[in-house]
Amino acid sequence: MLNCIYVDVLIVLNWYINYFILLGTAKITHIGFKRRRLVLSALVGAISSLLILLPPMNFIISVVIKLILSTILVLIAFGLKKFSTISKMSLYFCVISFIFAGMIMALKSLLNSNAISTNNSYVYADFSLGFLIVSTALCYGLLCLLRYFIDRNTGATGEWVLNITYDNRSTRLKGLADTGNALTDTFSGKPVIVCSKDSLVNILGTYNLDNIVSMDSLKLKGFRLIPYSTISNGGVIVSFVPDRVTITNLSNGHSKEVDVLIGISGDCSDAIFNPKILV
């Protein structure tokens, strides 16, 4: 039986929680995102939480509805991608959601609290704002820590080939898996694959190729500057948003489309990527 539920609190609570679940999904799958899309998707998920007000559903029906809604939220948050990618992200979203719901139920049992109501796989908790912020930040922090240890133990062996498409032109480059490449875009959170300017001539053309690392390059579609630092120096690297990047392992034939930026450096012979983007 449900306790007294305030619809405004229900929607705001689930909006906040869904945002961090989506953020956690992006973190665990290394998928780039735009925050406004995450906010919109979380809002749609928050509105769907009104299902908690309906009579209790059959468990199987409730799970099916949850899976369908999860797929819709993933599509809104991250856009159209390959079916396998969407399926994996929807699965991660559901797993993180169910883990969170399980933690809430455990907390309810531990505290013997009537402030928590659950129905149809949705949760309503009349907690203070401070408790909500701290507990959510803690859960997200634990997820980031898990991702860190997974990435640290990730190895990538074999020969790699990258197919990069930009502005209806494509090029094929030899890839080098290097865990030392930790470069990411601050705003989108996307990892950056570093390539030489000469290797990109097939897709960038000869337009300003000699000065491609200058501010003039920002006139091209999707270009931006990303700050970087190493032990010996630092600066900025010019990058651009490709239309599509696929990484193939020639040793086993495995191929994966990745959501990344392409950074342009004049002194690297291969396309250098961090193998964690393949996880």
Image (tube, helix red, strand yellow):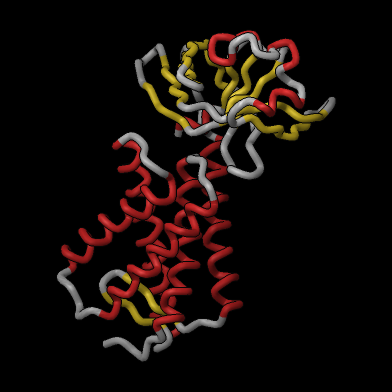
Question: Viewed as shown, does residue 118 lie left or right of 131?
Answer: left
Name the residue at 51% across, 41% down.
Answer: 32
- Tell me the residue at 74%/24% (across/down): 216
* Quadrant position of residue 125: bottom left
Please determine whether, in this image, residue 156 is positioned above or below residue 100. above
Image spot of residue 263 (x, y percent): 64, 25
Q: Position of residue 56 (x, y in %)?
A: 20, 77
Q: Residue at x 50, y 22 (%)?
A: 167
The answer to whether residue 101 shows anywhere in this view is yes
Q: Residue at x 46, y 30 (%)?
A: 258
66 relative to 165, above or below: below
Instruction: Name the quadrant containing residue 62.
Output: bottom left
Compared with residue 208, is residue 263 higher up or lower down, i.e. above or below?
below
Q: Position of residue 243 (x, y in %)?
A: 47, 27
Horizontal side of 38 relative to 88 (left or right) equals right
Image spot of residue 15 (x, y percent): 46, 67
Closer to us: 122 or 111:
122
- If the image is split into quadrants, where does the N terminus sit? bottom left
Quarter containing the C terminus: top left
The answer to whether residue 180 of the structure is visible from this angle is: no
Foreground of the two, 40 or 162 = 40
User: What is the number of callouts on the image?
Assistant: 0
Residue furthest out toward the bottom: 4
